[in-house]
Image (cartoon, coloured by chain):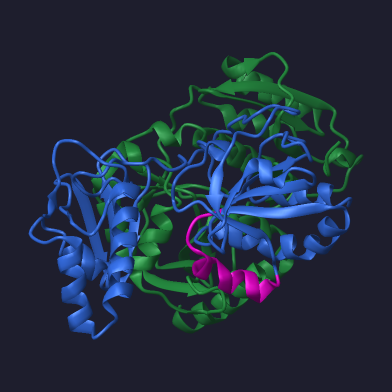
Amino acid sequence: MDKLDHLGWVVSVSFAIGDVRFAVRSTSPAFGAWLSDALGSFVVDDVEEYLYSVVVPEPPPRGRAKDFCVLYKGSSAIVRTLDPVALGRALLAELEGLGFHERADALYVMGSVIDVSGVPTLVPSSVVPTLMKLGRRAAKLGIGIPGELAVAIDLETASVVPVRPSLDLPDDVLERLADTRPRAGSNSVRFVETSEVVGAILVPARDPRSPLQTARKGYVLANLAGLALNLQEVGGRGLEALGRFVGSASCYESAWTDTGDALARFADLMKGTA
Amino acid sequence: MNERAGAEEKGAAEIVGAFVPLQRPDVTTVVLDGEAVALAEGAASAFFLDELATLVWNTFDGSASLDELAEDFANVFVADLEVVRNDILTLTRNIGRAGLLQGIAYEPPAEPSYAWPTGVGLGEPIPPFKLPDADGHLVEVSDLRGRQVLLVNWSPRCGFCTAIAPELSELQPELSARGVELVFITLGDADENRPLLEELDLKPRLLLGDGAETEVFAGVGTPAAYLVDGEGRAASQLTIGADKVPSLARSAAGR
């Protein structure tokens, strides 16, 4: 039993990607069929570890048009959207992430780019479950929802860039998903679509009692380096790129004991700088 | 006589004041706002040096022993020599463990990974460890027998740990009521851990990992946890991540 058991799972598909074996479960037979079809080359026999759980509500008239699709990692909601394609894309981004620690084509960092009052901001992806809990409050604060829990930083330009796909998937993998449930609203989930310069970085303060304040960049660099997944693969080039990335952004730190409150104060600050 | 770094590498714990520190040539150092982050080629994690530590790091050019450097810094900062000597020795050992100095063997930390290491199976003995607590007393896994323990791999520098700390604090009275002791194997010293714990009134027993990886959490990042039974055996699967560790704590607390 786990805390998500009440959600009514009807289908489970097991996968092996690299050396990671896991299962994805869903409330939707159609989503399960998409999983088996789109990721067929990675399907294996039963694995009991549910790494991801996907709620896809019944389409109208059996379900309500405004019911959200939800992607859980473990027991934490990491994406909530009315658009099943955005949810599927977020899941595929997660599965790409299973191999980041072995790649050397970019520096991969467990961070998410969110728009805060219009400013592209990198935050540790550990805040994403809190963002989900903020719900509409996040939107009122001008904070967008990320679709990716890890970002790629280009080793040459030190910009955030789209992840280069490495999984062998059908070209129309997301189009196939669109058939499972009509999109019931605009896609408010943010993905890194092009090379982009991040305007701000927010990290937990080194003193947990610290108010929201400008952070020293060496500390921010160390914090993000601690979230890097493949420093061993990219070596000094990766650290130097991360240094340039941090050097070009405005850096902030905040006490992290109430992440929602920290994000709200940060959103207020960004309103003044946007 | 000073000990110049030679071909044979020592463990960081063996380094003494006569050691002459020299940065490895393959180390990349990035300095921003006066604070440095250094990475040895092939190392999985970078090492942060605050402003003072960066000053010390910049003197590691193979020309002076730690004792000589301590004298210089004590004179410049008009500080107690013994305090400075101990601080520099501790810093050097930690820098050495990160693979940044010639003559000191690299000690790999847990590798960051999206993957889920499996750990020991349910009912199997927890791998042994022997670590100092906040008072300097060495604690072995056998010392924890006789009661259930929620054993958490922790770092005060980890945003994921900081994020789950309030919930662990909330759960601690219920854990105690059920006879479950909260024990953190943590990075950093007691002083580094104290501010967050005091702010949240979180009172785990701290075992200081000193940056060295313990077998019990080998290859695992922070936070991660086991529930350990009264006989030192795993009463839960290895649990990893800011979503799952609180879930394990809630379960152990009877919620």
Considering depth in this image, is A183 or A108 the residue closer to the camera? A108
Residue A58: x %, y % from top left: 85, 38
Vertical side of B183 occupied by A36: above or below: above
Q: Is A39 positioned to the left or the right of A27 in the image?
A: left
Q: How far across and how far down the image is residue B73, in percent?
A: 20, 76
User: Looking at the image, is A50 positioned above or below residue A107?
Assistant: above
Rendered-image quadrant of the C terminus of chain A: bottom left
Which quadrant is home to the N terminus of chain A?
A: top right
Q: Quadrant of residue B37?
A: bottom left
Of residue A100 and residue B81, the one placed in the foreground of this image is B81
Question: Which percent across, then down, holds residue A255?
Answer: 56, 74
Q: Which residues are magenta?
A: B186-201
Q: Number of numbered discs present? A: 0
What secondary structure is the stretch in magenta mostly built from? helix
Residue that appears at 33% across and 67% down: B87
Q: Nearer the viewer, residue A3 or B121?
A: B121
Chain letter, colour green in render:
A
Q: In this rendering, does residue A154 appear at all? A: no
Compare residues B27 and A27 and report the one nearer the observer. B27
> The chain shown in blue is which?
B
Q: Residue furthest left?
A: B63
> In the displayed structure, would residue A170 be above or below residue A89?
above
Is-magenta flag for residue B23? no
**x and y, in percent, of residue A260 in the image:** 66, 69
Which residue is drawn at the image coordinates 76% and 28% (left, top)?
B123
The residue lying furthest to the right in this view is A62
Q: Is residue B10 visible?
A: yes
User: Left or right: where does residue A225 sit relative to residue A50?
Assistant: left
